[in-house]
Image: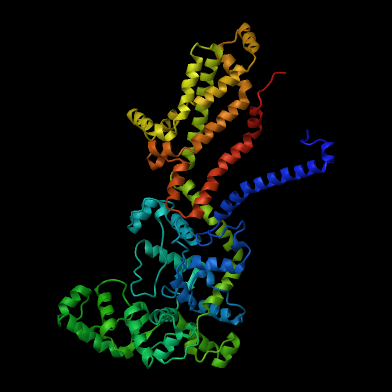
C-alpha cells in the first residue's frame, strides 16, 4: 500500500513533501554508505596516500601517481636510495615525475648491456618493498618467504637448524634492503643471507631490481656538503655543472678541488668492494703490514692463517674479503696509506660506458641515438629513470593488482597460516550457537509451561545480568575459570556466555504466545514433555531461534576480551585476538583491511538467514 494515495498526489504541497522525504532518505543513505566506501578505499592504500579521503584510489586512474607509489615501494620509502639511483634531487616521492618522451634506444642499449654482462652481487640492489610501513608485506617479501617455504618444505625447524636462526614463526622471516654503496655494508652473505643472495641473483624479477649509481652516491655527498646549492658547489670546486644529474664520479682521482672530495669519498665512504689498487701500491702495502706487525711474519701468518716466509711474498689484495682481520687491515690501508694515484673504481656505470664505446664509434653517434649532449663517454649516465618507466609501463596491471590486494593478503596470510585462528573461531562459534539453542530454550520452556510462583522474580534476576558490562564480570569469570582448571580450553569460552537473560526472556514470551491447545492435544496423544518441547515448541519457534542463533554467533565471533583473558596460549587464539595483535603492529590501511575481512562472515550469515530473521519479527500465527 503506498504511503500517499492517488488523491493526495494531485496536490502540489503533497508532491513537494514526497520529494523532500525521498531527498532526506537518499541523503541519510549517503551518510551511511560514504563512510563505508572511505573505509573500503582506505584498505587498499598505504600510509602515504591514506590521508586522501577519496572514494576511488588515485593510483587507479592516474599513471603518474601509480608510478610514484611503485617507486616509493620499490625503494623502501627511502628518498636517499631513490635519489642516488635516479640521480635526481628528490624532496618527496610525490614530486617525482615520469621522464617524458625519450628515444627508445636508451633503454634498448641498457637492456642489451644487462644481457651481455649478467649482473653480479655488486651490480644491483633488490627492491624488497616498503617494509618500513607497519604490517605491510610487499610482493617480494612474500615471494622470498614462499621460496624459502618451498625450499624447506614449510619446515621452519629445519630452516633454523641449517641456517643457524631461531625464528619462532614464518612471520619473522623478513629482509631489509641492502645499502651496498656504503662502507658499513660488508657483503658478508652467510646463513640465511646466503639464501637471500641466491634468490636475488637467480629469481628476482627485473621489475624489482634497481642498479646502484656511484655517481648518484657521490652527488648526494656533494649535495649534503653544499646544502644542495649547485651554484655554491660550482664556485667552490671550479666546475660548471648545469644540474645535479651532471655530477659524476671519475674512475680515478681528477685534478683540482674536486679531486680532494673524490679522494675523501673513496677513502672514507665508498664500499671497499668497488675499490681497486694498481700494482704500484704493492710495496706500500707490504711496508704497511711490516710496520703494523712489527716485522713478525710468524704472527701475521697466525692471524691470516697463511704460510708466508717473509713480507715480500704477500700479494696485493685482488678480491676484497668480507670478514676477518685481512678486511680490517685492508680497510685501514685504503683509508690512510694507499697512494691516491693507485686508487681506481669499478662499477656497473663504468662497464656500461665501456659497452657503449664498443657499440658506438663516436660520441656524436651516441648522442644522436640517445638524444643527449654528453661531452664525453665518461659522463654517460645509466638511464635508470627511463628504464624504471619502461618497466612500469610493462607491468601497470600487475602493480595495480598488487596495491589493491597486498593489505588483504597480509591479513589472510596471518589468519590462515599463523596459528589456528580460523579453526578455533569455527569451533567456538559452533559450540556457542549449539549451547545457546539448547540451554536458553529449555529454561524459557520450563518457565512458560510450568509457571512457577517465582517466575517474574527469576526473569527479573536474569534481566539484571544485562546491567553489568562484560568488563565488570571479566575478573570474576577469569578467577572462577582458573579455579576450575579450564584456562586455554573451549569450555572457558563457552560456559560464561552459555545462558543469556535476554534470550530467555525473549523465548519465554514467544513460547507463551503458542496455543495451549497444541500441548493439551499432544498430552492426550501420550506425548512426553521432551517430545512436546522438540516437536512442537522448537518446531514452531524457528524464526526466533534464528534470531537467538545469530545473536549467539555475533557475541562469540566478536568476543575479544574474554577470549584474550582466558585463552592466553597463542594456539587457542580466536580470529578477533589475532586481528587485535595484528592491529598493534600494523598501519591504518592494514587495520581497515582486517576490519573488512572480519565483517564478511557476519554479513554472509545475515544474508543466509535474513528470510528466517525477518519472519521472526512477526509473531507466527496458526492457520
Above or below, 398 relative to 286: above
Left or right of residue 549: residue 80? left
Q: Is residue 211 visible?
A: no
- Choose between 61 and 529: the one closer to the eye: 61
Q: Residue most toward the top?
A: 524
- For the residue pair 479 and 8, the one nearer the viewer reads as 8
Image x and y of residue 203, in percent:
48, 65
Tell me which corner region of the image, top left, top right, bottom left or bottom right, holds residue 183.
bottom left
Q: Is residue 455 visible?
A: yes
Q: At x 54% / y 92%, what residue is drawn?
A: 363
Q: Residue at x 57, y 43 (%)?
A: 600
Colour setup of the view: rainbow
Residue 377, position as x, y percentages in the image: 49, 89
Where 180 sits versus 570, above or below? below
- 531 above or below 218? above
| Image-quadrant location for residue 200 | bottom left
Image point (45%, 73%), residue name: 124
**Image quadrant in which you'd find residue 189:** bottom left
Q: Quarter of the image for the C terminus: give it.
A: top right
Judge left or right: residue 575 versus residue 280.
Answer: right
As displayed, is residue 123 above or below residue 1?
A: below
Q: How many marks?
A: 0
Amino acid at each position: 500500500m503506498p504511503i500517499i494515495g492517488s488523491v493526495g498526489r494531485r496536490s502540489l504541497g503533497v508532491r513537494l513533501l514526497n520529494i523532500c522525504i525521498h531527498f532526506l532518505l537518499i541523503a541519510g543513505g549517503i551518510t551511511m554508505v560514504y563512510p563505508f566506501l572511505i573505509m573500503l578505499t582506505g584498505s587498499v592504500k598505504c600510509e602515504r596516500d591514506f590521508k586522501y579521503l577519496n572514494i576511488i584510489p588515485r593510483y587507479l586512474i592516474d599513471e603518474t601517481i601509480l608510478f610514484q607509489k611503485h617507486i616509493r615501494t620499490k625503494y623502501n620509502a627511502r628518498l636517499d636510495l631513490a635519489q642516488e639511483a635516479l640521480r635526481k634531487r628528490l624532496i618527496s616521492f610525490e614530486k617525482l615525475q615520469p621522464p617524458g618522451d625519450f628515444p627508445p634506444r636508451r633503454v634498448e642499449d641498457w637492456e642489451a648491456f644487462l644481457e651481455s654482462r649478467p649482473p653480479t652481487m655488486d651490480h644491483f640492489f633488490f627492491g624488497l618493498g616498503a617494509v618500513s610501513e607497519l604490517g605491510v608485506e610487499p610482493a617480494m617479501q612474500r615471494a622470498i618467504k614462499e621460496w624459502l617455504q618451498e625450499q624447506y618444505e614449510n619446515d621452519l625447524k629445519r630452516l633454523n637448524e641449517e641456517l643457524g636462526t631461531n625464528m619462532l614463526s614464518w612471520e619473522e622471516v623478513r629482509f631489509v634492503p641492502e645499502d651496498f654503496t656504503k662502507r658499513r655494508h660488508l657483503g658478508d652473505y652467510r646463513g640465511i643471507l646466503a639464501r637471500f643472495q641466491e634468490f636475488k641473483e637467480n629469481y628476482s624479477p627485473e621489475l624489482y631490481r634497481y642498479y646502484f649509481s656511484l655517481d648518484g652516491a657521490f652527488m648526494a655527498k656533494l649535495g649534503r656538503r653544499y646544502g644542495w646549492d649547485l651554484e655554491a658547489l660550482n664556485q667552490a670546486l671550479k666546475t660548471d655543472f648545469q644540474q645535479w644529474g651532471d655530477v659524476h664520479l671519475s674512475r680515478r682521482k681528477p685534478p683540482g678541488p674536486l679531486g680532494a672530495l673524490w679522494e675523501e669519498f673513496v677513502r672514507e665512504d665508498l664500499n671497499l668492494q668497488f675499490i681497486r689498487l694498481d700494482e704500484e701500491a704493492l710495496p706500500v702495502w707490504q711496508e704497511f703490514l711490516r710496520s703494523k706487525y712489527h716485522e713478525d711474519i710468524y704472527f701475521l701468518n697466525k692471524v691470516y692463517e697463511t704460510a708466508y716466509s717473509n713480507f715480500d711474498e704477500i700479494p696485493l689484495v685482488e678480491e676484497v674479503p668480507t670478514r676477518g682481520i685481512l678486511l680490517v687491515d685492508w680497510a685501514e690501508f685504503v683509508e690512510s696509506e694507499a697512494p691516491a694515484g693507485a686508487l681506481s673504481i669499478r662499477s656497473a656505470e663504468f662497464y656500461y660506458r665501456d659497452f657503449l664505446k664498443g657499440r658506438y664509434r663516436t660520441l656524436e653517434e651516441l648522442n644522436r641515438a640517445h638524444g643527449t649532449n654528453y661531452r664525453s663517454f665518461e659522463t654517460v649516465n645509466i638511464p635508470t629513470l627511463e628504464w624504471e618507466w619502461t618497466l612500469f609501463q610493462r607491468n601497470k596491471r600487475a602493480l595495480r593488482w598488487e596495491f589493491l590486494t597486498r593489505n588483504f593478503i597480509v591479513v589472510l596470510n596471518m589468519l590462515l597460516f599463523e596459528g589456528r585462528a580460523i579453526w578455533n573461531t569455527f569451533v567456538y562459534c559452533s559450540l556457542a550457537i549449539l549451547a545457546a539453542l539448547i540451554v536458553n530454550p529449555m529454561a524459557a520452556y520450563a518457565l512458560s509451561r510450568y509457571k512457577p510462583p517465582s517466575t517474574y522474580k527469576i526473569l527479573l534476576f536474569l534481566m539484571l545480568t544485562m546491567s553489568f558490562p562484560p568488563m565488570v564480570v571479566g575478573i570474576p569469570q577469569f578467577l572462577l575459570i582458573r579455579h576450575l582448571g579450564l584456562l586455554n580450553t573451549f569450555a572457558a569460552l563457552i560456559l560464561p556466555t552459555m545462558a543469556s537473560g535476554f534470550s530467555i526472556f525473549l523465548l519465554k514470551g514467544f513460547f507463551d504466545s503458542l496455543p495451549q491447545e497444541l500441548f493439551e492435544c499432544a498430552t492426550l496423544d501420550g506425548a512426553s514433555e521432551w517430545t512436546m518441547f522438540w516437536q512442537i515448541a522448537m518446531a514452531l519457534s524457528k524464526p526466533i531461534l534464528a534470531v537467538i542463533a545469530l545473536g549467539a554467533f555475533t557475541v562469540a565471533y566478536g568476543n575479544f576480551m574474554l577470549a584474550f583473558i582466558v585463552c592466553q596460549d597463542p594456539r587457542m587464539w580466536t580470529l578477533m585476538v589475532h586481528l587485535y595483535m595484528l592491529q598493534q603492529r600494523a598501519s591504518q590501511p592494514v587495520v581497515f583491511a582486517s576490519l573488512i575481512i572480519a565483517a564478511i562472515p557476519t554479513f554472509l550469515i545475515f544474508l543466509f538467514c535474513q528470510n528466517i530473521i525477518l519472519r521472526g519479527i512477526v509473531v507466527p500465527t496458526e492457520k
